[in-house]
Image (cartoon, rainbow, N blue to C red):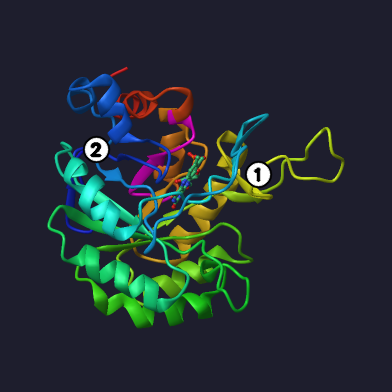
Amino acid sequence: MTIDLCGIELAHPVINGSGTFDVIAARRVFGDCVDREFPFAAFVSKTITLEPRLGNPPPRLFETAAGMINSIGLPNRGLAGYIEHDLPDLATLPVPVITNVMGSNADEVGQLLEAIDGRDEVAAIELNVSCPNVKTGLDIGSDPAELTKLLAAVRGKTAKPLIVKLTPNTANVALVAAAAEAAGADAVSLINTLKAFAADPARPGQAWLGGGGGGQSGPAIRAVALAQTCAVAAAIALPIVAMGGITSAANARQFLDAGALVIAVGTESFRDPMSAAKIRDGLAGRV
Ligand SMILES: Cc1cc2nc3c(=O)[nH]c(=O)nc-3n(C[C@H](O)[C@H](O)[C@H](O)COP(=O)(O)O)c2cc1C
């Protein structure tokens, strides 16, 4: 089942969705067995921003009929903290590390890419473009022209494979994917969470989540993710990392059949931290 993802050799096609598996905490609690039974073929970090972020006020998670809405708000140690505290741990994982970064403008993204480019521990960079442009309020990744501008400014900052993580919250994801391809992305990943709202039952019209709105993930978004994977696969020739509600080898197979090279498991890891290993084994015909 060996896969070549932009020159990175993966033992199988199952990785994690950014922000959905805290491997450092898992190792602290469960020790060596995490490495021995490692479920993912590569490990994608949570999104790193230039400066540290505390994230959103609680509550941060809301369970829905088929998944959840999160409003975590990208808490992270910032670039310097990631390099000093997290990367040394991640570098000892038994699989390649993909660092996920996000910035609100080309200068921030450029600094992140340049810094990670210098780290031998990192095999590839995933660029999360679900970030609002401070001037327009629109997510950079929702507009092909904005994304073209961003990538034109930053692509040269790293020689590492660059995976652009697309947002599903756009009118035409295939146009955005084509813009990423034309501007030098090495792969795309999709989908990130869909914009969603959890109403507070005690306060009509008010948000239940501390951060206001949030992002829906899990089985509720699988059909949307599959449709967007098909649309992107038809529009571009780049490798695709597909995710969104994958819970079994059978539905992982549908994403691979739709044109994905690799699939990622996100929300399902909260329900069963070993779900990715079961999906991997199911794809290999071992279960
Ligand atoms: C709690 C939570 C935190 C997430 N954090 C990030 C993040 O830091 N960066 C990112 O690019 N995506 C983040 N995501 C999105 C996932 O990586 C994935 O794209 C999305 O959840 C769809 O996959 P799923 O339905 O299998 O969870 C997060 C999702 C969840 C549920």
* Residue occupying the point 56% across, 48% down: 56
* Residue 49 image point, x, y percent: 39, 60
Q: The magenta stretch spans which residues?
A: 259-269
**As drawn, is 258 to the left or to the right of 281?**
right
* Residue 160 image point, x, y percent: 21, 65
Question: Is 82 rendered above or below residue 70?
Answer: below
* Residue occupying the point 33% across, 69% down: 185
The residue carrying mark 2 is 12
Q: Is residue 52 magenta?
A: no
Q: Nearer the viewer, residue 112 or 265?
A: 112
Kind of residue indicated by mark 2: His
Question: Is 164 rendered above or below residue 137?
Answer: above
Quadrant position of residue 165: bottom left
Q: Is residue 268 magenta?
A: yes
* Residue occupying the point 52% across, 80% down: 145
Rate crowding at label 2 as few (under 14), some (14 to 19) or many (20 or more) other CA atoms within 10 Å: many
**As drawn, is 94 to the left or to the right of 270?**
left
* Residue 80 image point, x, y percent: 27, 59
Q: Secondary structure at mark 1?
A: loop
Q: Residue furthest top?
A: 287
Please identify, in this view, whether the residue under mark 2 or under mark 1 is nearer the observer: 1
Compute the Cα span from label 2 to label 1: 38 Å
The residue carrying mark 1 is 210
Q: Quadrant of the N terminus?
A: top left
